[in-house]
């Protein structure tokens, strides 16, 4: 088999790390993001469908070697490189080689993925990743079968394996789609499994759906649904639950699980305040799970396209 997308990309962009979304991994820092074409799922609600549904290599706009990507990330001040836009497990050879080149320059690596990968392939792929945001698209087999043309169980197994068998920093995102995976009962079951399997310290993001691809007849997610989901998850003991794709200061804030003090306040992707003392709460000294540095980044919410050819010149 030949990976025909190796060395080719749909484009490069510097994003805030919070956009992946990762709330507890080098907050405020810039990440060089890129993807290729295609996907191993067929989600009817795909938010990146022009990229993930493409079967044409011609849709790829820029050629880049792993070494060139790592060099561009370093030259532009990025702290990490994200494999995103479409699922990197389908271009694992390219992602792995790029990750190796990044690590040689002291850069971290991030996988934004649906977690739909076999047990045989998991160790090789994730051994090169420092962090991952995994999409848990719903919590019923029917949802995965009818709307994603995939299966739920392999994703749950990937999450459990990542948590128990690796040092990869993981966060999880669930896009709440009105009438399909947003019932209080389903969120209760998801939260209960999450607490029992991943524990209270793995951040969970509930994101708002917007009509796209083959589900343009479904309305946007009401903010009240996100607030209820967050409340349910927190009631199951999850300490770090966030809301995404909406302006919601409370749902963007990291609170101390010990004393309740707001420690990292955000406005969308902007850091408003960062009040950690070596990864702990300065008031009650509770440890905050994550990968933090003493001084956060200040990239903000900027999205900056990058030309690798210009970086090399």
Image (cartoon, rainbow, N blue to C red):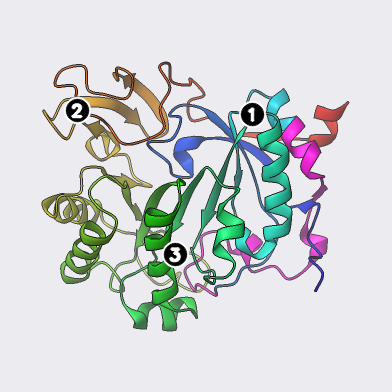
**Gap between marks 3 and 2 measured at Cα:** 29 Å
Nearer-the-camera pick, 275 or 47:
275
How far from the left and from the top, in percent, is residue 123?
A: 56, 60
Who comes first in sequence, dot 3 or dot 1? 1
Who comes first in sequence, dot 1 or dot 2? 1
Q: Quadrant of residue 76?
A: top right
Task: Return the residue at label 3.
Answer: 158
Nearer-the-camera pick, 110 or 101:
101
Q: Residues within 10 Å of mark 2 (few under 14, many from 20)?
A: some
Q: Secondary structure at mark 3?
A: helix
Q: Is residue 25 left or right of residue 186?
A: right
As drawn, which residue projects farthest toward the front? 165
Q: Please identify the quadrant where the N terminus is shown.
A: bottom right
Question: Residue, x 45% and y 72% (percent of image)?
Answer: 215
Q: Secondary structure at mark 1?
A: loop
Q: Is residue 82 left or right of residue 19?
A: right
Question: Residue, x 42% and y 61% (percent of image)?
Answer: 161
Task: Return the residue at label 2.
Answer: 286
Work out whether residue 254 can be spotted: yes
Task: Return the residue at label 1.
Answer: 106
Q: Quadrant of residue 209?
A: bottom left
Q: Is residue 250 above or below residue 54?
A: above
Q: Is residue 60 above or below residue 102?
A: below
**Gap between marks 3 and 1 measured at Cα:** 27 Å
Q: Is residue 49 magenta?
A: yes
**Gap between marks 1 and 2 measured at Cα:** 29 Å
Q: Is residue 166 above or below residue 103?
A: below
Which span of residues is magenta-colored?
42-71
Nearer-the-camera pick, 172 or 182:
172
How far from the left and from the top, in percent, is residue 47?
A: 51, 60
Q: Secondary structure at mark 2?
A: loop
């Amino acid at each position: 088999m030949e990976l025909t997308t190796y060395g080719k990309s749909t484009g490069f962009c510097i994003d805030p790390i919070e956009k992946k979304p990762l709330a507890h991994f080098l907050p405020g820092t810039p990440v060089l993001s890129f993807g290729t074409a295609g996907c191993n799922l067929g989600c009817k609600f795909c938010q990146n469908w022009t990229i993930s549904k493409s079967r044409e290599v011609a849709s790829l706009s820029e050629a880049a070697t792993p070494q060139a990507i790592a060099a561009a990330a370093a030259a532009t001040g990025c702290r990490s490189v994200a494999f995103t836009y479409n699922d990197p497990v389908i271009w694992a050879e390219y992602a792995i080689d790029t990750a190796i080149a990044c690590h040689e320059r002291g850069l971290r690596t991030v996988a934004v993925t649906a977690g739909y990968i076999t047990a045989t392939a998991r160790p090789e792929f994730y051994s090169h990743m420092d962090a991952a945001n995994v999409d848990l698209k719903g919590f019923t087999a029917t949802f995965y079968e009818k709307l994603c043309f995939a299966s739920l169980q392999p994703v749950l197994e990937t999450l459990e394996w990542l948590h128990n068998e690796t040092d990869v920093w993981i966060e999880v995102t669930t896009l709440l789609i009105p009438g399909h995976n947003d019932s209080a009962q389903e969120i209760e079951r998801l939260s209960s499994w999450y607490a029992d399997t991943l524990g209270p310290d793995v951040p969970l993001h509930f994101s708002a759906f917007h009509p796209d691809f083959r589900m343009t007849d479904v309305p946007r997610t009401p903010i009240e649904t996100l607030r209820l989901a967050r409340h349910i998850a927190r009631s199951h003991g999850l300490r770090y639950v966030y809301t995404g794709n909406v302006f919601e200061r409370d749902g963007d804030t990291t609170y101390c699980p010990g004393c309740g003090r707001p420690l990292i306040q955000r406005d969308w992707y902007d850091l408003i305040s960062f009040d950690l003392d070596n990864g702990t709460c300065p008031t009650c000294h509770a440890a905050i799970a994550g990968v933090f540095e003493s001084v956060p980044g200040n990239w903000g919410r900027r999205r900056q396209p990058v030309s690798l050819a210009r970086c090399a010149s």
